Amino acid sequence: MPLRLNEVRMSAVKPSATLAMAAKAKALIKAGVPVMNLSAGEPDFPTPACIVEAARAAIGLRSSHAYTNPRGTDELIAAMQQKLSREQGVDYKDNEVIATVGTKGALMLALDALVGPGDEVVLFAPYWVTYADLVRLAGARPVVVSTDRERGYQPSMQEFEAALSPSTKLVVLNSPNNPTGAGWPESMLRAILERVRGTGIWVISDEIYEKLVYGDFKHVSPASFDDDARGRTLFVGGVAKAYAMTGWRVGVAAGPKLVIDALMTLQGQRTTCATAVAQVAAAYALREGPDVQAAVAEMRAAYTKRRALVLERARAIPGVKVHDPEGAFYVFLDVNERIPARRALPAGGGGSVIADDVVLANRLLEESNVATVMGSAFQGPGCLRVSYAASEDTLNQGFDRIAAFFASTTSA
Ligand SMILES: Cc1ncc(COP(=O)(O)O)c(C=O)c1O
């Protein structure tokens, strides 16, 4: 008998395209190639020193060497509750919050707890690569509502309506969004929550980029709208992006006790708890004393500057269009005008003609040594995700190369 994997489960999931692109870029850098890496989905800043110090002080303690409650330490539970009350405007009881292994950990547990075979989950494209895979891994089916640049990546309510069926069990929201950076106005979020009012449809609101917002955009949490919204919404977020803590792996979920109890049971059997010392660091970050506030403000100021820079550089390239992102640290370059080949490619692949965004991202990396992520990975074909979690120098050099690449290729 040949040795086999669980092929049904493994066919539901693909390796993350963003991680793959970052790994390819890192391998080239290791080999000495001077790659401008604009593919990273993580801050280029170190974790603020005050947070690191809090963890350093805790690392020798017995409590940091032991399993914690699967929900998280008392200290972290309190910090999560204070944060959710202060920033989301929602008061959660002790048994309505849980600390997880990253935001991804919260999403994985939530999808397993909420959906299964026969269920449909509405996703708004372009979406973060992981959602669809986690839905399929849970045995459910993603139903995709497309959004586009012209409408600021907000869905039409008719298209949302058309995606709903008696099998719809869950809607996933992500504002501000990865990969587009689009933040939805409160009216859009309210319209969606209004449509599912009184139904058996859950809502997951992934608010990982809530603190990275620009201009006069105001982030709101759907759970804060009213009792119905609070009772069906699972807030997920974490410390990774705003506090530059991607590797610490601590996420937060908050919602009705029914769901949080299920997440606790699953987490207890799967990973037990988030790493004890990382929970100390996360609690320190979430309490947001003046030192943490200053560090977050400094990083946001840097992102604000870089955002302006990349928008200016992107708009200077003929045929490249871009939505002014309300949040996160991505711009989503719409390069459809520069991809004629989906219409007609000359025999032999077209030489300098760009076939699609996958070819484009690979050629940019291999020929011009600039790493981006193809929009297709996010169900946003004809686009490229550029991360500005990179220094201004890297961004400028990266855009010099992107501009030179486009100047040398055949346009539509
Ligand atoms: C929309 C979104 N949600 C969740 C995550 C994962 O966050 P964490 O590192 O806390 O698992 C990411 C990471 O890129 C993301 O972009």
Image: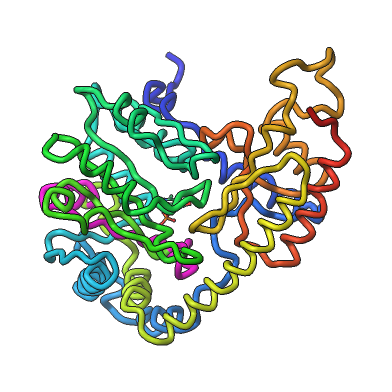
- For residue 31, side relative to residue 46 (left or right): right
Quarter holding the N terminus? top left
Residue 240 in the image, given as x and y percentages of width and height: 44, 62
* Corner quadrant of residue 374: top right
Relative height, residue 179 to residue 167 (above, below) = below
Quarter holding the C terminus? top right
Relative height, residue 118 to residue 402 (above, below) = above
The answer to whether residue 73 is visible is: no
The answer to whether residue 368 is visible is: yes
Relative height, residue 242 to residue 401 (above, below) = below
Residue 242 in the image, given as x and y percentages of width and height: 45, 67
Magenta span includes 262: yes
Of residues 376 and 45, the one nearer the viewer is 376
Of residues 45 and 72, the one nearer the viewer is 45
Q: Residue at image x 85%, y 30%?
A: 410
Residue 200 in the image, given as x and y percentages of width and height: 14, 34
Scheme of image coloration: rainbow
Q: Which residues are magenta?
A: 240-267
- For residue 147, side relative to residue 233 (left or right): right
Magenta span includes 6: no
Q: Residue at image x 38%, y 50%?
A: 104
Q: Residue at image x 34%, y 29%?
A: 158
Residue 366 in the image, given as x and y percentages of width and height: 79, 41
